[in-house]
Amino acid sequence: MNDTADTKKEFLPPTQRFFGRRKGPSLSDRKQGLMDGLLPRISVQIPEGDDDQIDLEALFGAKKAEVWLEIGFGKGEHMAWQGQHNPDKGMIGCEPYLNGVAGLLTQIEEQGIDNIRVYGDDARHVLWKLPDASVDRVFLIHPDPWPKKRHARRRFVNPDNLNEIARVLKDGGEFRVGTDHPIYREWTALQMSAREDFEWQAKEPSDWLVRPDDWPETRYEVKALEGHATYFRFTRLVRK
Ligand SMILES: C[S@@+](CC[C@H](N)C(=O)[O-])C[C@H]1O[C@@H](n2cnc3c(N)ncnc32)[C@H](O)[C@@H]1O
């Protein structure tokens, strides 16, 4: 996608803009119907005031013991699975690729899932507006690897985004990153090892080489052209 206008564009440097694509093939009538009918009912609205934050209780219509956030859900297989298997949790999924959003809506409708809320744009807009220590899990499953060195600043795992993820996670909360790309694996390990607010949970290789039972395979992972997937799980350490 080209650099797109976003709400903070004027006061954000170019490194803060979104890179990716928003549109693919035109949608079927059914999917367009879900975009027009279902999406507005389960959309996350970004509050406009500088100091305004997302009201999670209002978003889910009830206080949820836990809130989980997925960044870049693609066609939504992981998001729908988590929603269906954790009906007591509130789930927020962010994905700017509109055909992906339509894919998730189809699963939400077919499976009768009612605990997922959707933001059809850059996940950072949501991150910036979530209250401190309000989220229990953040999923970043196969982020775009941007393997070329000159594109490294586009990688979602970067100090600015990690600061935001650390801010919104509760103490003891979990940050999951899945990648099949060797460059992104090394990049993530390096970025995360530099942090004092996260701890890698792995004790032995099987902890990151074997897919956990509660981590379903995504469409992208099935393609996994770049090799073996890595399943990173980091704990947000207790605030000092
Ligand atoms: C390689 S795909 C993986 C999709 C999905 N997680 C899977 O495993 O099938 C990466 C996804 O991240 C999305 N993405 C990239 N930047 C994003 C951002 N700033 N906020 C939310 N999603 C983003 C892309 O649109 C794309 O769908």
Image (cartoon, rainbow, N blue to C red):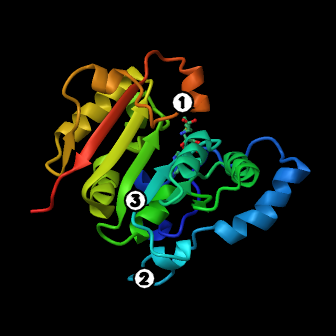
In the image, residue 16 sits, relative to residue 131, either above or below, namely above
Residue for point 43% across, 46% down: 139
Of the two numbered discs 2 and 1 in the rendering, the one whose residue sits closer to the viewer: 1
What amino acid is labelled 3 in the image? Pro
Figure quadrant of residue 32:
bottom right
Q: Quadrant of the N terminus?
A: top right
Query: Residue lying furthest left in this view?
Result: 240
* Gap between marks 2 and 1 measured at Cα: 36 Å
Q: Position of residue 179 (x, y in %)?
A: 43, 29
Circle 1 packing at 10 Å, graded few (<14), some (14-19), many (20+), is some
Please name the residue that numbered disc 2 is placed on.
52
Residue at the spot of label 3: 13
Q: Which residue occupies the foreground of this view, 28 or 158?
A: 28
Residue at left offset 49%, top offset 60%: 88
205 vs 4, nearest the viewer: 205
Q: Residues within 10 Å of mark 3 (few under 14, many from 20)?
A: few
As shown in the figure, which amino acid type bears the numbered disc 1?
A: Glu
Q: Amino acid at mark 2?
A: Asp
Kindly identify which numbered label has been placed on residue 225. Answer: none
Q: Quadrant of ligand 1?
A: top right
Q: Is residue 172 above or below residue 40?
A: above
**To which residue does mark 1 refer?**
217
**Observer able to see residue 19:** no
